[in-house]
Image (cartoon, grey):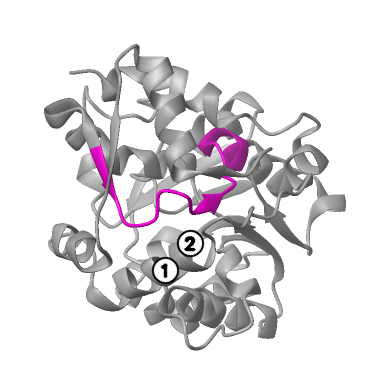
Amino acid sequence: MLTLVTGCRGRVGSALVPLLLRAGHSVRAASRAPEQLSGPTAALPADVPVVACDLGDPATFPAALAGVDSVFLYAEPSGIDAFLAAAEAAGVEHIVLLSSSSVLAPDVLGNPIAASHHAVEQALIASPLTTTLFRPGVFATNAHQWSRSVREHGSVDLPHPRSHSSPIHEMDLAEAALAALTEPRLQGAAYHLTGPESLTAAEQIDLLAAASGHPIAVNTVSGEAWKESMAAFVPEPIADALLAYMAESEDSPAAVTDEVERLTGHPARTFATWAEQHADAFRP
């Protein structure tokens, strides 16, 4: 059985590849920029076959999918119909989609983040392929967005410090994906994956400060100021959707599920664990 793992420059895909290898499964690593997956600084094992697969470019699909039995797929709507056609032609049997819990919100089509994931989900559900849907909430690794400000200024600017989320560790997602890709009894279902507790953004900052051994100040800023600071990295519609989410979740605990344990057999890792493992990124 050969598994194609897309998005291997991402933290989940790069964590999943070695897990599959250690479990004795054949893996092909894919990325829009495969040259960045090779060499001495690459995160992947040196003997993993690497292939170009740009999920927005159908010309890259046939070679990437040749001989593949299962796929770990990132949610990119622009080329999904062509990808599924190529996957079916190649004989792919099962796809695990890294979707988003945003699709569970009432106004799916009014939220650009939810709408893009929903479009990919609907295409997969309509296909003849066995589909497993992963719907994680906030990734713990999103905290890296604060690291530069913490290192340079010892502070973080937040528009809604009391907004809640239940951040999930990237290794829990990778281990859950391993289970879904290799255990037929777990396939064909949808999973809402979360971390083990709801935390405010300010509480996450406190845990990062404790792990790094350095205080981190939280500065409350306006939504417009936050958008301006993110303009170089986040398109305005996405920034607006994120701001709306933060406002709606202020003082409102996020959902917490046991789906990680259901898939992996162990409780989800805490954000405190993630903070300890990545503390160097938050030290001056």
Q: Amino acid at mark 1?
A: Pro
- Relative depth, front residue between 280 and 206: 206
Q: Is residue 149 left or right of residue 54?
A: left
- Relative depth, front residue between 251 and 164: 251
Q: Is residue 29 magenta?
A: no
Eyeballing the image, is 79 above or below 133?
below
Q: Which residue is mark 1?
A: 62
| Residue found 43% across the figure and 28% down from its top | 206
Q: Which residues are magenta?
A: 156-174
Q: Is residue 141 left or right of residue 253?
A: left
Q: Is residue 170 left or right of residue 145?
A: right
Eyeballing the image, is 281 above or below 231?
above
Eyeballing the image, is 67 above or below 39?
below
| Residue 218: x %, y % from top left | 30, 38
Q: Which residue is mark 2?
A: 65
| Residue found 53% across the figure and 77% down from its top | 120
Q: Are marks 1 and 2 in contact (CB under 8 Å)?
A: yes
Q: Is residue 159 magenta?
A: yes
